[in-house]
Image (cartoon, helix red, strand yellow):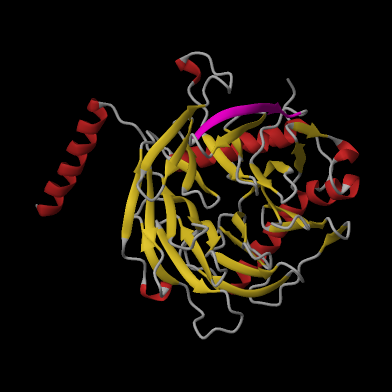
Amino acid sequence: MEETGGEEKMKAGKSMAPALIAAHPDGSCVVVAVGAALRIFNLSKEKPVQVQDDTLPAGHGDVIRAVAFDLHNSLFASVGDDKLVKLWDATAWTCIKTVRLSKKASAVTFSHDSAWLLVADKFGIVYVFSTVRHDAIHKPVLILAHCCSIITGLCCSPDGKYIVTSDRDFKIRVTKFPENPLTGAHDIHTYCLGHTNFVACVAFIGFQGLLISGGGDATLRLWEYETGALLDTFDTTDEAGVSGQSQGTRAVVAVAVSSCNTYVGTILERFEGVLLFACDMVERQLSLLQKVLWSENAPPTSLSFDSGGNLWLVSGAAETVEMGDEFVTPEALAVAQVQAQGIAMAAVTHVQVVRDCVLLGGTSVPGGELLLHTLQGHQAGVQDVTAATEAAELAMKNLLSKRQYTAEQREHRKRMRNDKVVSLAS
């Protein structure tokens, strides 16, 4: 089979980051983050939206890794590999403030009252800062940490009592939200333990005291987060069509909960579709509602429900610029930013919508062809999008999966470390 451009990039060892999608809580607009760019379509006005960023540095200089709307529908946040946190006015779509972290960001969320923005980095630290435009504190403040374990999920409970964080080391931690976040969150309430591989995603289910999580063990788990009790476990292996251990499992890489808090959408690694679950609030258990397959052979990379119950899906990825942690000049940063924006402009995604368990197509999608043109970018073959998506999934799985060593390898590594100690001592 003839190689596509996407396959060539993957073979060349390019690092890729998945495309993300976020529907505005009130259903007024949809945002796709691909590479260093935000593509926004206003559904109420039926037209594309251009962001305005007068902060410094203007725009992202590398791929965006996480995005979030606040619950009060007026704020939006984007964070990425350029170590920048950007807070946006989600009505005018202007950047309110830009804050720089010391490490690359991995997750972002707002407090229940929208007064605070919490950002996690790949070193396992969660920072907090005020969402007030002209507050006196311009630097993020450490609020909690996970001891050098990459934080994969971050969310604040709807009642405002807790911060939930998940990490690469199979843990879900429930921390009490402090009265003054700037003094730190020191009170760990409980842990939700049970995943046997990395936890990739977490989300709350309304005000019912329930939390949903998914991870590298291919399971979707339902928790009572105040007690840490595991209520239900759904193994997605059979639903993903994996037959035999030789093919391995497919990680649950993303979850989303509908505004009515009764439906859960789930994305599996290398699975060309989405699994829809119903959550029984009385019995506190999950049941598979529908398996919706894509019309294209391209696994989705992100999903989001809007207020009308539509489930928005996106597939695609973009190359990272990878400036590294070394000191760089302002001129080098400017060149990298131009490069990142060029990559983002050329990146192609596919957008789909599921309504009432049915996949909408073409002009049936809210916003029609204009929305698709805005969010998807230039036209390209499905193979290009698929290859880029698979490369992004592989990069993320390599980052989150802990390397497994045999007993012989462990002994060799131990011997090598001891030899180094002896040589240094002599």
Q: Is residue 166 visible?
A: yes
Q: Position of residue 59 (x, y in %)?
A: 68, 67
* Residue 261 vertical position relative to residue 218 in the rendered view, above or below: below
Residue 239 picture quarter: top right
Nearer to the camera, 253 or 222: 222
Q: Is residue 12 visible?
A: no
Q: Position of residue 149 (x, y in %)?
A: 37, 50
Q: Which residues are magenta?
A: 285-294
The residue positioned farthest toward the left in the image shown? 426
Give left or right: position of 375 versus 33: right
Kindly identify the residue that appears in the image at 74 percent across and 30 percent down: 383
Q: Is residue 53 magenta?
A: no
Q: Position of residue 205 (x, y in %)?
A: 54, 47
The residue positioned farthest toward the top in the image shown? 244
Kindly identify the residue that appears in the image at 73 percent across and 29 percent down: 294
Kindly identify the residue that appears in the image at 15 percent across and 49 percent down: 421
Kindly identify the residue that appears in the image at 23 percent across and 27 percent down: 407
Give left or right: position of 169 versus 266: left
Q: Position of residue 266 (x, y in %)?
A: 59, 36
